[in-house]
Image (cartoon, helix red, strand yellow):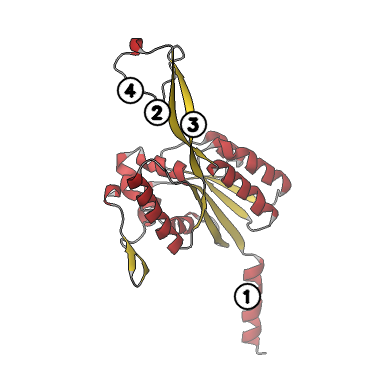
């Protein structure tokens, strides 16, 4: 083996040795609603999570091992469900791994004396016409947070990542991060806060290793329109997302 070949092999060895495997855990609804609540950001919903992950890497020695997208399809709105399914198909074309949850029907109560009115409660013009308590049916997302938390811990035990980026402002995920940190103190955890959100608790749990998604990240990380799936199928960005 020549000197040049030896140096090349040695370089490959050290590149592999010091490569940091980064994994992105994306709370799909947390990210989606952060964009949807501000009309200025709704045009960025056609978001390429793989490209976003590459853009957010902090270390020169890091590579994206995997991007996991945690979400669920609504069952009560056919149009929303179809747009969501098209988006998921587009993401999988770019290597994103989708972890599905589900929505389940639930019964909720509203008590007018506590003034706790949610956007799912009946709409009325006068609070005085309400009875003391109202019971109503709605749908609630299930499993997404649990799936995300489980994967953070499970993949830490399987040693699938060195650096976990948690794309969410939801503090409910924090206990899973704490468990993984306590068992694997050499692994790094970074909170990636969706645009417009704060996520103070999850930022604290991640030892204030924090990144905030900005509009420039969304601009740079859009899927092509259309996304070519194969020779006979392409997917266009939904017209409502423009």
For label 2, the residue is 120
Nearer to us in this view, 82 or 175:
82
Q: Quadrant of residue 93?
A: bottom left
What whole-number distance in Å separates the C-alpha atoms at marks 3 and 2? 12 Å
What whole-number distance in Å separates the C-alpha atoms at marks 1 and 4? 66 Å
Q: Quadrant of residue 76?
A: top left
Q: Residues within 10 Å of mark 2 (few under 14, many from 20)?
A: few
Looking at the image, tell me whether mark 3 or mark 4 is earlier in sequence order.
3
For label 4, the residue is 123
Identity of the residue drawn at 62% across and 85% down = 4
Identity of the residue drawn at 42% across and 55% down = 88
Mark 3, mark 2: which one is toward the viewer? 3
For label 3, the residue is 106
On-image quarter of the N terminus: bottom right
For label 1, the residue is 11
Most distant residue in the bottom direction: 1
């Amino acid at each position: 083996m020549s000197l040049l070949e030896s140096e090349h092999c040695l370089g490959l060895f050290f590149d592999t040795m010091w490569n940091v495997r980064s994994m992105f855990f994306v709370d799909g609804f947390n990210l989606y609603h952060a964009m949807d609540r501000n009309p200025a950001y709704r045009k960025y919903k056609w978001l390429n999570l793989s490209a976003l992950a590459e853009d957010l890497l902090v270390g020169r020695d890091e590579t994206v091992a995997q991007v996991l997208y945690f979400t669920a399809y609504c069952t009560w709105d056919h149009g929303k469900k179809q747009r969501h399914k098209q988006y998921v198909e587009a993401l999988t074309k770019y290597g994103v791994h989708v972890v599905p949850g589900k929505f389940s029907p639930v019964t909720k109560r509203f008590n007018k004396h506590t003034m706790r009115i949610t956007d799912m409660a009946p709409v009325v013009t006068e609070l005085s016409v309400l009875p003391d308590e109202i019971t109503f049916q709605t749908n609630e997302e299930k499993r997404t947070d649990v799936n995300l938390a489980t994967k953070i811990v499970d993949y830490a035990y399987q040693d699938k990542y060195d650096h976990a980026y948690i794309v969410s402002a939801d503090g409910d995920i924090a206990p899973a991060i704490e468990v993984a940190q306590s068992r694997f103190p050499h692994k790094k955890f970074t909170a990636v806060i969706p645009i417009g959100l704060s996520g103070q608790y999850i930022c604290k749990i991640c030892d204030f290793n924090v990144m905030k998604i900005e509009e420039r990240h969304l601009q740079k990380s859009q899927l092509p329109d259309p996304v070519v799936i194969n020779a006979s199928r392409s997917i266009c960005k939904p017209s409502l997302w423009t």
